[in-house]
Amino acid sequence: MVLPSPPRPTLSELFAAHPRDGGWAGFLLAQVDESRPVLWVQDRMAILESGRIYPPGLPRFPLLHVEARDARDALWAMEEGVRCAALSCVIGELWGDPRALDFTATRRLAVAAERSGVPCWLVRLGATANLSGARMRWRIASAPSLPNPLDPKASGAPAWDAELFRARGAPPGRWSVFHEADRVHLVAAPGDRALGENERRRA
């Protein structure tokens, strides 16, 4: 089973299941191309409520970090970044439902990403799924890690619950996702699987 993805780089949204659930970060970073720099933008409220990113805890890709005063500045930085073809992707964390984040702003990000070929991920923390120009919209929650085959008392591969609730050109669905080095695995949620389908499939 392959992780649903847009036919070309564009704007996707990730909604954290809980404002302080960081599971979305693992889900997102498992898909990042580490060969080129990543631009990561956080608005002030996202930093205050969920914390500043910690580069030593991230994969070893070149990182450009922007701390924006507010959502308007964060959106400006994201749009400027997404026009730079040298970037692997642009990640933007915004808190709540700021007035600046309307359909026009998300539409501009989507069009800019599609023109440049640079994926853009808009992470929504403590937010509602209001009208958006994003081509794919996910809800992500942390899940218990898999059993560790070498030590039953240790944590295993990280896992997430992922719900794709809106996508252009792809049906919605829910999956249990877990990550191992160099690959991501998906399992459709019980209500979305065919009877007798294997418990896990490799991406």
Image: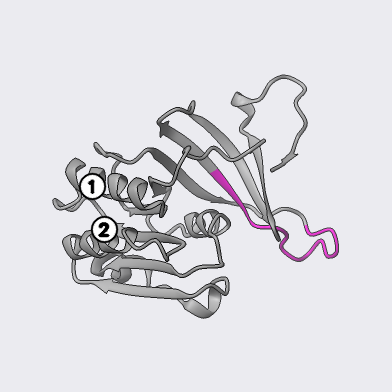
Which of the numbered marks, if any, corresponds to residue 194? none
Q: Which mark is residue 108?
A: 1
Q: Nearer the viewer, residue 169 or 149?
A: 169
Q: Residues within 10 Å of mark 1 (few under 14, many from 20)?
A: some
Q: Please say if 23 is above or below 3.
A: below
Provide the secondary structure element on which disc 1 rests.
helix
Q: Position of residue 104 (x, y in %)?
A: 18, 43
Q: Earlier in the sequence, mark 1 or mark 2?
A: 2
- x and y, in percent, of residue 141 in the image: 50, 49
10 Å crowding of disc 2: few (<14), some (14-19), many (20+): many
Q: Secondary structure at mark 2?
A: helix
Q: Quadrant of residue 194?
A: top right
* Closest to the observer, 33 or 134: 33
State the residue position of label 2.
Answer: 79
Q: Amino acid at mark 2?
A: Glu
Specify the quadrant that holds the C terminus. Answer: top right
- Distance of mark 1 from mark 2, alpha carbons? 8 Å
| Residue 122 placement, left or right of 35 | left
Find out whether residue 12 is within the magenta segment: no
What's under tag 1, amino acid-wise? Arg
For residue 192, side relative to residue 77 (left or right): right
> Looking at the image, which is closer to me, 156 or 25?
25
Please, what is the dominant secondary structure of the magenta stretch? loop
| Residues drawn in magenta | 148-161
152 drawn magenta: yes
Residue name at image x 66 percent, y 25 percent? 193
